[in-house]
Image (tube, coloured by chain):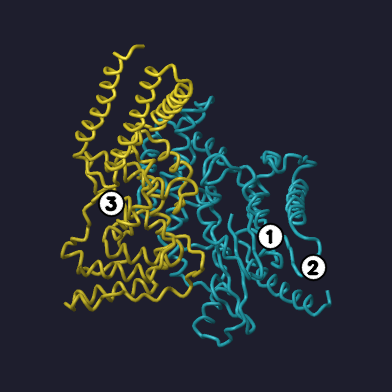
Chain colours: A yellow, B cyan
Amino acid sequence: MSAQWTIPVAILHSLYVATLVGVTAAVHHIEFRFDELRDLWRGILVSSISIVVWITAYILNEIHDNIRWLEVVSRFLLLVLASILVLAFFSISSSQPLLSQISLRRRESREFRTMGQALGIPDSGVLTQSEQNSRIDPNEPLDKLLLNKKFRHSFMAFADSCLAGESVHFFDEVHELSKISENDCVRRIYMARHIIDKYIVAGAAMEINISHRSRQEILLTSDLARADLFHNALNEIVQLMKTNLAKDYWSSMFFLKFQEECDMRCNGFELEQMTGWNYSPRLSSVHGTDDPFHQDYLLKNSECGNDTDS
Amino acid sequence: NMGLVCSKNRRYRDSDPEENAQIKLLFQTGFDETELRSYTSVIFANVYQTIKVLHDGAKELAQNDNNSSKYAISEENKNIGEKLSEIGGRLDYPHLTKDLAKEIETLWEDGAIQETYARGNELQVPDCTKYFMENLQRLSDASYVPTKILWFLMLPVGENKRSGEVYRLFDVGGQRNERRKWIHLFEGVTAVIFCAAISEYDQTLFEDESKNRMMETKELFEWILKQPCFEKTSFMLFLNKFDIFEKKILNVPLNVCEWFKDYQPVSTGKQEVEHAYEFVKKKFEELYFQSSAPDRVDRVFKIYRTTALDQKVVKKTFKLVDETLRRRNLFEAGLL
C-alpha cells in the first residue's frame, strides 16, 4: 500500500470520531445523571489516541521499511492496538450502554440517597391535606396505608429494626418506579435494573423472600419497562408483610410515635418540635454488630425527621 | 426449614408480672376466643392462595404436560376457576362465605385439580391443603373459631423466665434470604434447635425450584455443625412433619431424594414407616458424628420426631437447655 492511502484512511478515522461526537450530541437530551457523557468523552479520547498511535506506527512502517528495529516495533504496536480495539468493540454490549463500566452504587451513595432521587423521580412529599391530618386506621389494607409516605417511613424504620426491612424497601422502590411515566422507557429501565440488582437476584444485597416463579418471571422478562413487571412479587411481599410484620407494628413503639406525631400535627404544633424522631427500638428487636443493611436506624430516623421539616 | 436458637442469660433475675402472665398464656392452652379468631383471616388467605396455586398449576400442566388432557379443568368449572384465581391474586381477600366455600369445594373436586394436587410436590402447595379443603364448610361458618394450634408458632420466642433463670429464645427464618441475617450471630448460644421437615424429601425449595428441600437441609445442617462457634453448642434435631411423612412414605419412595438413594423398602404399612424413619434418622446421626469432634462430651445431640400439633415441643426445648447446662457444669467440674 502506498502513502497516498494514508490520507483517506486518516479521514475515515476522523469521520468515526466525528460521528461519535454527533451521536453524543444527539442523545444529549436524555438526562445523564451517572456521568455517562464524561465516560463517553473519555472513551472517545482513548480511542482517538490509540488510533493516532496506530496511524503513526503504520506510516513509520511504510516509510522507513529499511530500518529493522523500527519495523519490528511499529508492527508490534499495530498488532497490539488493533487487538485492543477489536476487544473493546466487542466487549461493549449495546444493550447496556456504558452501565457496566460505571459503578452505579458507589456514586449513588455519594450523590444521591436513593435511586429514585438519582433518576429525578418527583418526591411524593407534597401530601394532600387530608393525608397529612388523618389518623391511620389499622383496619385499612396495608398496601393502601403504605402509599402514605410518612406511614411508610415509620413502618420501614420498624421493619429495619427487626431485620426485615428489605420488604418495605422493595415496596418503596417499586412505588417510585410506578411514578415514572409509561413513555419514559430509559428511566424505567434504569430503575427496574436497579431494583432487580438490589432485591431480586439470588444473593442480592437486600434479597426479598419471593417464590421461584415470581423471581424467574422477572429475571427472564424481555421487557424491563413493562408496567406490571413487579406485580406478582409485590403481591407476595405485601402478603408477607401483612402476616409477619403488621401485627407487631401496631403494638410497637414506632406506631405510637407515629400516631403521636399525627396528633401533634393535627393540633397545630410547630413542626420544629418534631426534629429528630427519637425512636427507642422495640424490646425484642435484634441488635447485632452484623447488620445486613449497614444502616444506623436512629441516625436514619432523625434524617427522615429532618426531611419532613424542610 | 426453620431454625430455633436458644440462649440463656442469668443476669436478669427480677421478675416482671406482665411477662409472667404472658408465659402462663403460652404454657397452658389458655387462648381466648378473640385471639384465636384473629387467625381466621390468615386461614382464609391460605385457602384462597392454595386454590389459586392448584388452579394455575393445572392450567400450566394442561399446556406443557404430555398427558395434558388429565389436567384440563371441566367446562362448567372453568369460570369458577378463573374467578377464584383472580381472588387469590388480590391483596385483600373477601370473607369466606358459604357460597365461596361451595365454589372452592366444587373446583377442588374437579378431576383436573385432584390430578394436579397429586403432583403437589412440584408446585408449592402447602401441607394443610387437604385439611382445609375438606373442612371448607366448617371454615365458612360464621361462628368458626380455629381449633388446632400449631405449637411451633406458640414457642415463647423472646425472653422467658423459668425457675429463676432467664432463657432467650430466638426464632429465625430458614429461607435463603433470611438465613444470612442470623448466620453470623451465633456466638455464645447454648443450644440450637434445628427443625427439618422430614416429609419434604420429594419437594423443591420455595425460592429455588431446582433444589431439593432435603438436600438443602442436609447442606445447611452440615454447615452449621462445622462452625467453630458451635463446638460446645448442643443440638436438638426435630424431624418435623412426621404425620405427613407417615402418609407420604407409602406412596412416594424415600430414594427419590439423592441423599437417600441407597434406601431399600422392606415391608409395608406401619413397619415400613418406622424403617424409613430410622433410615433418615441414621443419615442425620451420621452427618452429626462426621461433622463433630468425637471428644465433645459436654455437647448434647438429640433427635425427636415431631409434628406441628405436638404440644411437647416447648417442654422438650427447655429440657435440652437444662441438660446442656448440667452437662457443662459437670464437665467444668471435671466429672465427665
Identify the residue at horizontal 40%, vertical 60% (top origin).
B142
Q: Is residue A138 left or right of residue B145?
A: left
Gap in angstroms between the C-alphas marked 2 and 3: 58 Å
Q: Is residue B93 visible?
A: no
Placement of the C terminus of chain B among the 4 image quadrants: bottom right
Kindly state the secondary structure of the residue where label 3 is placed. helix
**Helix, strand or loop status at disc 1:** strand
Residue B22 vertical position relative to residue B151 in the rendered view, above or below: below
Depth order, front residue of B148/A90: A90
Q: Is residue A51 above or below residue B206?
A: above
Where residue B297 is drawn, which disc sits there? 2
Q: Tag 3, which chain?
A: A
Q: Are dots 3 and 1 on a single chain? A: no
Quarter of the figure with residue B55: top left
Q: Quadrant of residue B14?
A: bottom right
The residue sitting at 34% across, 12% down in the picture is: A2
The mark total stands at 3
Q: Which residue is mark 1?
A: B237
Residue to which mark 3 is pinned: A118
Q: Is residue A185 left or right of B94 when viewed as pictured?
A: left
- Distance CA(mark 1)–CA(mark 2): 17 Å
* Amino acid type of the residue that numbered disc 3 sits on in the rendered structure: Ala
Q: Residue furthest front?
A: A67
The image shows residue B248, relative to residue B292, as above or below, that is above
Q: Quadrant of residue A215?
A: top left
Q: Residue A87: percent from the left, percent from the top?
A: 43, 29
Q: Nearer the viewer, residue A72 or B287?
A: A72
